[in-house]
Image (cartoon, rainbow, N blue to C red):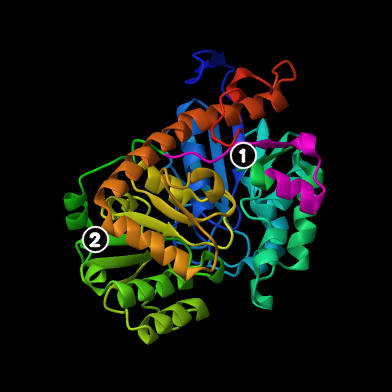
Amino acid sequence: MKPMISNPETGDTAHPMMRVAMLSMHTCPLAMLGGKKTGGMNVYVRDISRALGRMGIAVDVYTRSQDDCVPMVNHELGENARVIHIPAGPQAPIPVSEVEHYVDEFAAGIVGFAASENLHYDLIHSHYWLSGLAAEKLEGYWGKMPLVHMFHTLGHMKNRIATSAGERATDERLAGESRVLDVADRIIAATPAEQAQLNWLYGADAEKIIVIPPGVDLERFHPVDKAEAKKRVGIPCGDKNIMFAGRIEPLKGIDTLIQAMALIKQRHPSVVENTCVAIIGGDPWADDPDAEMTRLQQMRQDLDIHDFVLFLGAKDQEVLPNYYAAAEMVVMPSHYESFGMVALEAMAMGRPVIASEVGGLAFLIQDGINGYHVPTRNPEALAEHIYELLANNQCREEMGRAARHYAERFDWPIIAHRMLAVYQSLVDPVFKESSDLFDFPLFNSGY
């Protein structure tokens, strides 16, 4: 007999176990954070799969194999969940623009693996537009089945903030996103803002879209002793630390952070004497670093702040809590974020966040309560708020406590049960998606 699942919000029991094919074609959920194409989506796929697995849902995460030395099946996700690496194209990292050429091969590989283990899935949950196209291919093999999709980032939104042709989404991506919107049964939007963007920019069917934000692992991300955390990570300078974590690319606005720190050094030199800015992401030691890393390192040198602005490279997700704990604040000056997983993790650690008022950051950060909003590309405003938190210990600590309190409503079991309600509404027509699961608002803005 299949186990029944308890809902942590209402205490009610949900429907029995099901089997889900989770698709993350272009990036593996176990990859280090801050690589060229690793970030919030990797964390999301990993943690939603773990949370569903703990609830008794069988989850197979399919991703494109990028290393023929890695075992095909990985069980690091824990109970009932695993990652399956499917050969499709070169077994090496390739640009995302080339991954589309291997969608057919990826889908065929999934079908072959499932057949070898006699697996039958109740539902497909795909992530990013490439996986959505692969999901449509799977329906060609397996027949029509429920398809849930989450984009994580939107091509049209990237184009709205792009400053060069190289930052723009391709026509193939835009067409692919529109196709996925047509074939998916449900679209998961991270915020009400993304829901509006899908309606406004893509003309998406409003009845297909439901807002379920990402969650945070409160067992992993929780307040810990700052001094001990500093010892663990070995941050090489500073009594006070500022942290950025994410991919090293123009839309993250790291140049605004560097410019802001130069302003603070100019105006308040005594403050930066004991401050370290830790930038986590990318590979600053590469023999052939990418253009954005090179640009940022040169900017740091030109502004004469290379002694306290440090590029630490990508870090394994298991050690990130120590970096958050060692910081006074986390800064996210992004031009676009569909949600902002780093901000939620930092808040769960009891750290205030200074962030651009874009995407999910506009909903997570309550200005003046658990952090600050700043305009994009505005180093003056960013410098002002960074200095305020550096100089005012009481304000920083109060905001940190408020941040932790707000983050608690995004505990993964709560989020996973909302996702399961969507799954069940598609698999079992008797189950109604308008369950009490969705009566409790997660965002203060009224979701």
Residue, disc 2: 240
Residue 71 position in % (x across, y down): 45, 53
Quadrant occupied by the N terminus: top right
Please give the count of numbered marks on the rendered protein: 2
259 sits to left or right of 214: left
The amino acid marked with disc number 1 is Ala
Q: Secondary structure at mark 2?
A: strand
Mark found first going from the N terminus, 1 or 2 = 1
Q: Inspect this view and state whether residue 287 appears.
A: no
Task: Please determine whether, in this image, residue 345 is positioned above or below residue 37.
Answer: above
Q: Is residue 205 magenta?
A: yes
Quadrant occupied by the C terminus: top right
Q: CA distance from mark 1 to mark 2?
A: 44 Å
Q: Quadrant of residue 444?
A: top right
Q: Inspect this view and state whether residue 162 appears.
A: yes
Task: Please determine whether, in this image, residue 309 is positioned above or below residue 335.
Answer: below
Residue, disc 1: 21
Q: Residue at x 69, y 77 (%)?
A: 165
Q: Residue at x 44, y 50 (%)?
A: 343
The amino acid marked with disc number 2 is Lys
- Identify the magenta region: 195-216
Q: Which mark is residue 55?
A: none
157 sits to left or right of 381: right
Q: Nearer the viewer, residue 147 or 210?
A: 210
